[in-house]
Image (tube, rainbow, N blue to C red):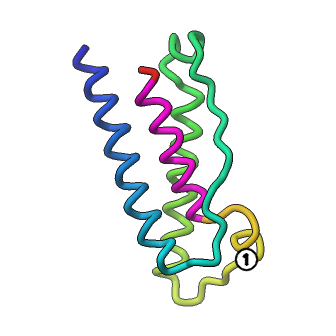
């Protein structure tokens, strides 16, 4: 039972932090697309193995968001690629992180 409480608190903390970052960045970068589809398995089989695939996906999205944020704000010579303007960008990663953590928090 204690593990479940820690899990939910962790998901909430990640969810909230991603939300704060999303809001702050969206004020600065108003032209970026900021929503992306999220499809994760929350079924019994996924639950049995502790949502391993979903946790890996969450980890990858966090790493992508962190790298893009770091590059944009802290690399003086960073170039924004067309992909970031039209498709994948830090706001989309933060949105996905929020969606994943919300779903995982609800199902376990």
Up/down of 19 relative to 44, above or below: below
Name the dominant secondary structure of the magenta segment: helix
Q: Residues within 10 Å of mark 1 (few under 14, many from 20)?
A: few
Q: Residue at x 54, y 25 (%)?
A: 52
Up/down of 68 relative to 49, above or below: below
Q: Position of residue 35 (x, y in %)?
A: 63, 56
**Magenta residues, as a range?**
90-106
Up/down of 61 relative to 87, above or below: above
Would you say residue 94 sits in the magenta stretch? yes
Up/down of 87 relative to 9, above or below: below
Would you say residue 52 sits in the magenta stretch? no
* Quarter in which the C terminus is drawn: top left
Q: Which residue is mark 1?
A: 81
| Marker count (numbered) | 1
Q: What secondary structure is found at the residue carrying circle 1?
A: loop
User: In the picture, residue 71 is in which quadrant?
Assistant: bottom right
Residue closest to the far bottom: 76
* Quarter in which the N terminus is drawn: top left
In this rendered view, identify the residue nearer to me: 60 or 33.
Answer: 33
Residue closest to the far left: 2
Q: Position of residue 55 (x, y in %)?
A: 51, 33
Q: Residue at x 47, y 63 (%)?
A: 22
Q: Residue at x 57, y 47 (%)?
A: 60
In this rendered view, identify the residue nearer to me: 58 or 36.
Answer: 36
Q: Position of residue 70 (x, y in %)?
A: 48, 72
Q: Residue at x 32, y 45 (%)?
A: 13
Residue 14 in the figure: left or right of residue 33: left
């Amino acid at each position: 039972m204690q593990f479940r409480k820690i899990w939910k608190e962790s998901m909430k903390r990640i969810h909230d932090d991603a939300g704060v970052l999303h809001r702050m960045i969206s004020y600065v970068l108003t032209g970026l697309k900021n929503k992306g589809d999220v499809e994760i398995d929350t079924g019994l089989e996924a639950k049995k193995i502790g949502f391993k695939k979903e946790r890996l996906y969450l980890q990858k999205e966090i790493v992508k968001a962190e790298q893009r944020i770091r590059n944009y704000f802290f690399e003086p010579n960073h170039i924004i690629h067309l992909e970031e303007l039209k498709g994948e960008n830090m706001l989309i990663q933060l949105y996905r992180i929020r969606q994943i953590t919300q779903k995982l928090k609800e199902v376990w």
